Image (tube, rainbow, N blue to C red):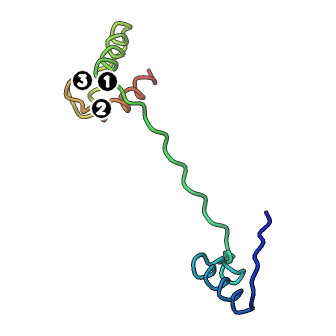
């Protein structure tokens, strides 16, 4: 990039420079914050828990029915959530239920 500026007087040049600096001040080396050295290394960010897949009532009911037909005891898993029947289980617990069902 090439910039050419022509001034007739020194005062004209100073005025131009001051107007540029007033509008868009470029940081000098002293203005740039320097990194702070820590005595010990910083703890890494905790790994985010992967999002659980959301399931619909129909999907979960189908899996439970298939397992029941295969002779698996699904009612004990449902009871472990503190409910008597699947229809009493809140939707936000469907992911947890499916994880437990996969263990069968």
Q: Secondary structure at mark 1?
A: loop
Q: Could you tell me residue 18's position as x and y percent? A: 63, 86
Q: Dot 1 surroundings within 10 Å: few (below 14), some, or many (20 or more)?
A: few
Q: Secondary structure at mark 3?
A: helix
Q: Residue furthest bottom?
A: 11
Disc with the residue nearer the chain's start (1 vs 3): 1
Q: Could you tell me residue 23's position as x and y percent? A: 57, 77
Residues tagged 3 and 2 counted as in contact (Cβ below 8 A): no
Q: Which mark is residue 69?
A: none
Q: Which residue is mark 2?
A: 80
Give 68 or 33, whichever is nearer the viewer: 33
Q: Secondary structure at mark 2?
A: loop
Which corner quadrant holds the C terminus? Answer: top left
On screen, residue 89 versus residue 44, left or right, reads left
Q: Residue furthest top?
A: 69
Q: Which residue is mark 1?
A: 56
The mark lying in front, picked from 1 and 2, is: 1
Q: Could you tell me residue 44's position as x and y percent? A: 61, 58
Q: Which residue is mark 3?
A: 86
């Amino acid at each position: 990039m090439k910039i050419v500026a022509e001034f007739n007087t020194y005062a004209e040049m100073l005025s131009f420079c001051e107007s540029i600096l007033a509008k868009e001040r470029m940081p000098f080396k002293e203005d740039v914050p320097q990194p702070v050295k820590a005595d010990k290394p910083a703890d890494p960010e905790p790994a985010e828990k992967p999002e659980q897949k959301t399931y619909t009532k129909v999907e979960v009911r189908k899996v439970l029915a298939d397992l029941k037909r295969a002779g698996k005891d699904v009612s004990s898993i449902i009871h472990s959530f503190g409910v008597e029947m699947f229809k009493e289980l809140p939707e936000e617990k469907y992911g947890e239920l499916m994880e437990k069902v996969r263990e069968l």
